[in-house]
Amino acid sequence: MKTSLLFRLVVLFMLADLACAGEQRPNILFILTDNQAATLLGAYGNPDIRTPNIDRLAAEGITFTRAYAVNGMCSPTRATLMTGLMPSQHGIHSWLDDELLDQWPESWSAVAEFRTLPLTLKNRGYRTAMIGKWHLGQPWKASIGYQYWVTFPYGHTIDFWDNTIIDNDRTYPVKDRHIVDFFTEKAVEYLQDYAGEEPFYLQLNYDGPYTNPPTNYGPARNRFYRDYEGREFKSFPRTAYNENLVQQLLSEDTNPFLRGKLREGLAMHNDPATMANVASQNTLVDDGVGRVLAALREAGLEENTLVIFSSDQGNFYGQHGLWQHTVVTTPSSMYETAMNVPLIIRHPGRIEAGRTSSLLIGQYDIPVTILDYVGMGEVSFDNSPGKSFSPALTGRTGEWNDAVFFEQEETRVIRTENHVYWKRLRSTGKSELYDMKKDPEQNRNVYGDPAYEEIVAGLDARLTAFFGEYADEKYDLWRGGGAKGSVDRPERYKRLYGPDWTPETEIKPAFRE
């Protein structure tokens, strides 16, 4: 009896400790925008686009100036933010093609076999919610540990104003307001209804500003467009069309779908109405961020909420003669504009306001850091290259990475303080090297210059070692591996690995703790 009583007391004390820990842990609000380059925000120096709420968030927290996406497409980056893994580990190498949705298994979730951030938080006492764009498999039911679920079926936005909404167990149309405004309203509603028994993790995935056609081509239908109509935009380059795009249009090998995307991108190029459209969509997202932060404050939750603001990746808006994604050229173009994403983090009283950091951050570092910051640093994402930068949030110093890595199917990249090196898969294109100190706009490819031979050799060795350690052979496109869902140019891999090569959507056993 004494042993039984002692055991019960120990269990009660353990539960009490866990409850206390849960009370001390902060809420987490993670706002993720869609295709928003850091250079489109006032906090990152844009002189043309009004983003007062995001700028204020930066003034109240810490702004990371050199955070990088792992890929130039949304599905791979979102998978990395959930798993801490590279595309060549989780298997998603490109956007998951909406046109294949009805061909995928009904309950297919592309990252469910891995440890994910929401599931880990849920299993440790957090209430988890996802509002906004999903784009990681079938959207019809909550996945990877989310308990509250509001999304829409597609990843590519054809219309900001006419959408089907999946709201937990209900499906209904929303045609009377912009989808960004709708997701803002749902997030505000969630915060207003929060009862406070457990800390929450709310992932707010805006489907904007987007910067892709047809929604961002020409005049926009939103309340901020007239503020920008007819204005000059110094931050939008006026350049000649990129020669690679013209070559693709002239090639008989270019498929009809891609030919249409190329024409859309060329139509957007140097178009003042499109520039005003993109500017207005950024301000609309900023307005939503302001409304959500105000709701957080009005609910009395601001002091105990860690707010993270970032984007899945950027898009080009005229740089190097390009609009749209990194994959619009072949091989992919991995310039800074598309890969350098905003990363702003605020927690009143814990993170000193008004700071900036030039640490090189990869998206694979973010989920690791979140867990570490809220006291779950003992939890690991198996074989993740991620490292916690939590000490930097609270002003502590220590050793940090001197490079970040990213990949876009046939192109692998190492970015260091001074250089960025793009290595290409055999027979897909030539490698490139840019001296970021002498040429920050990346106008001169110095690969092949004898003066840079030693630098190339060193970077190539590091890049090879990184992917040698972390890439999973099953999803390593450089070693004949496969991909999940879809890739941008499947004919490339059929040519390299045989006609039977094809992406897969097999349902894997779900991760369990």
Image: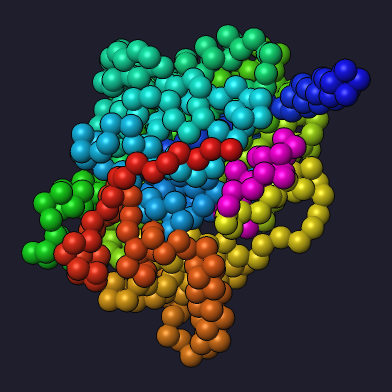
Magenta segment includes 362: yes
Depth check: give the residue in front, 175 or 274: 175
Rendered location of residue 288, percent (x, y)? 50, 23
> Which contiguous range is marked in magenta?
360-382
Residue farthest toward the bottom in the current orientation of the protein: 450
Answer whether residue 51 is visible to the viewer in this image.
no
Residue 445 lies, with reference to residue 72, above or below; the image says below
Q: Is residue 71 left or right of residue 365?
A: left
Q: Residue at x 28, y 14 (%)?
A: 173
Magenta segment includes 167: no
Rendered location of residue 315, percent (x, y)? 39, 48
Q: Residue at x 39, y 75 (%)?
A: 431
Q: Residue at x 68, y 50 (%)?
A: 388
Number of residue marks:
0
Q: Is residue 115 left or right of residue 509?
A: right
Residue farthest toward the front in the current orientation of the protein: 1
Residue farthest toward the right in the current orientation of the protein: 2
Position of the C terminus, as image quadrant, is top right
Q: Residue at x 41, y 64 (%)?
A: 473
Q: Quadrant of residue 245?
A: bottom left
Answer whether residue 125 is visible to the viewer in this image.
yes
Position of the N terminus, as image quadrant, is top right
Rendered location of residue 327, percent (x, y)? 31, 56
Q: Is residue 100 left or right of residue 1?
A: left
Rendered location of residue 45, percent (x, y)? 57, 46
Depth check: give the residue in front, 496 or 61: 496
